Amino acid sequence: MTTVVPTRPVRAVSPAGLTTDRPTRSERRAGRLLTAPFLVIYLLFLVGPLLVGVVLSFFNTTTVKSGLGDFVGLSNYHDVLTDSLFWESMWHSVLFTLLTTPPLVILALGVAVLASRIRRGRLFYRIAFFVPYVVPSSVVTLIFLWMYTPQIGLLPKLFDAVGLPVPDFIGSTSGGWTAVVLMTVWWTFGFNFVLYTAAIQDVPADVYEAAAIDGASPWQQIRHITVPLLGRTTSLVLILQILASLKVFDQIYQLLGGGPDQSTRPVIEYIYDTGFTAYRGGYGAAATMVYFVIIVAISAAWYGLRRRRATGSTA
């Protein structure tokens, strides 16, 4: 009678003497098949348009005629870099980022901390705070446009009720920025709220119990435990919010149309106007590439800073 001895899969040994499980050929094939749909979509809808935009930026392409047009080399890039309207719209995007990023980060953190300490109805509050984020931008714009309408809007009536002068939310530059910032904060802070909520759930309950035994108040626990342990999440939320705010288009275009007198027009709306209203496709592509390089530079700077901090903490 023969005895069958079960065999274990062979593990590769690394040069350092540690055993590592390497994927088999079938596992690698399955991995490639599973990632193939995403890779195809990524190439078709992200890498493909990017390459087309690079090519168009070297031609005087117009959106009312077929074909690339004449080759102009770096002329479009020169025009973009010397165009004051492009840099003015870039400043509007930066200003919007400066106005929206602090409240969207601080408010999301504060609400997430408060929601995590609610014992009853916690799920309801989490859903309620996140629901506005999934509402389409056009619907949100219509709601706030009604709220900002003079004489009949909710906010003008509230200002009248307390005896304060009613801001011109639609017809003035300062009122327009106030209107779009309020709408954006209400609409989008739910995404950051979810990120903070998930991070708070990973904080061990034993830490809070030990702090409570030592006599720490709830505010001291939030200040000395919750906030420091959410440092990496805050860094992630901050860079994601900066990149999202720099790409603002929908709410400003739908609510203000870049007005009054283009005083709130962000850079993406400027690219849209030059490419599809002025029909300068090549110039619009060059402006897009310049803006793309700026976004990549910001992302690379953040990645380098995070890597330097990680290296310094492990040293």
Image: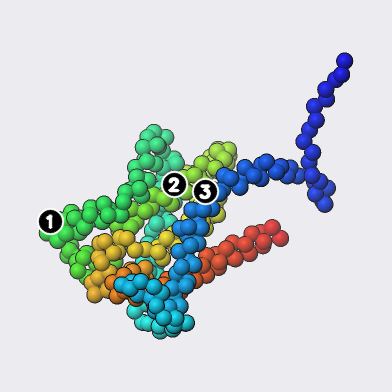
**Mark number displayed over residue 194:** 2
Q: Is residue 261 left or right of residue 42?
A: left
Residue type beneath disc 3: Pro
Where residue 247 appears, as percent x and y from the top left, is 40, 64
Q: Earlier in the sequence, mark 3 or mark 1?
A: 3
Residue denoted by label 1: 152
Q: Residue furthest front?
A: 66
- Residue toward you, 177 or 85: 85
Where residue 142 appears, as percent x and y from the top left, is 22, 54
SS state under label 3: helix
SS state under label 2: helix
SS state under label 1: loop
- Residue toward you, 27 or 174: 27
Where residue 19 appears, as percent x and y from the top left, is 79, 44
Q: Residue at x 78, y 41 (%)?
A: 11
Where residue 125 appears, as percent x and y from the top left, is 36, 40
Q: Give the distance between the C-alpha atoms of the residues marked 3 and 1, in whole angstroms.
A: 51 Å
Q: Quadrant of the C terminus?
A: bottom right
Asked where in the image residue 243 lies, by quadrant, the reply is bottom left
Residue type beneath disc 1: Ile
The residue carrying pointer 1 sits among few (fewer than 14), some (14 to 19) or many (20 or more) residues within 10 Å by Cα, namely few
Residue type beneath disc 2: Val
Residue denoted by label 3: 37
Q: Residue furthest left?
A: 151
